[in-house]
Image (spheres, rainbow, N blue to C red):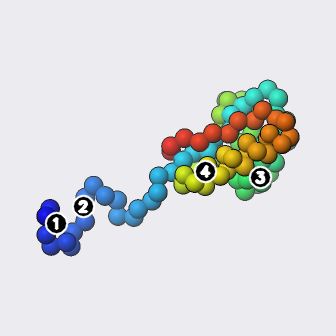
Amino acid sequence: MSNPAGDTKTKTQSRTRTPPQYKVLLLNDDYTPMDFVVEVLMRFFRKSELEATRIMLQVHHEGVGVCGVYPFEIAETKVHQVMEAAAEEGHPLQCIMEPE
Ligand code: TYC
């Protein structure tokens, strides 16, 4: 046994375990209305109108922007919610996730 006394912690492990985190990203396109993107950021990512507008404009100008960082299943749910809302309205908005 590598730790016979059982009273020390392996140095390579973090003391507080946090689940792996995933960035949820919005991608720019030429057709989705700016107002719709702002609404999505407020509704699904709980952003203020000011912050939602800032993120939307960042995506518009730079091509991609971070909506938030979450554990895997929450990130996955957010991506589905955004894609479903966009599809319902006929917008080509793309939302993806990637490891932080
Ligand atoms: N580029 C879009 C427009 O000019 C606005 C937009 C912003 C679309 C962010 C998608 O993730 C996006 N209407």
For image coordinates 67% across by 29% down, the residue present is: 62
3D distance between C-alphas at marks 3 and 2: 42 Å
Badge 4 crowding class, 10 Å Cα cut-off, few under 14, some 14 to 19, many 20 or more, is: many
For image coordinates 45% across by 59% down, the residue present is: 18
Badge 3 crowding class, 10 Å Cα cut-off, few under 14, some 14 to 19, many 20 or more, is: some
Residues tagged 2 and 1 counted as in contact (Cβ below 8 A): yes
In the image, residue 60 lies at what x, y percent?
Answer: 74, 32
Q: Which residue is mark 4?
A: 75
Q: Which residue is mark 3?
A: 42
Is residue 53 visible from the viewing direction of this image?
no
Q: Which residue is at the front of the view, 53 or 68?
A: 68
Q: Which residue is mark 2?
A: 10
Badge 1 crowding class, 10 Å Cα cut-off, few under 14, some 14 to 19, many 20 or more, is: few
Which label sits in the foreground, 2 or 4?
4
Say which amino acid is labelled 2: Thr
Q: Which residue is mark 1?
A: 3
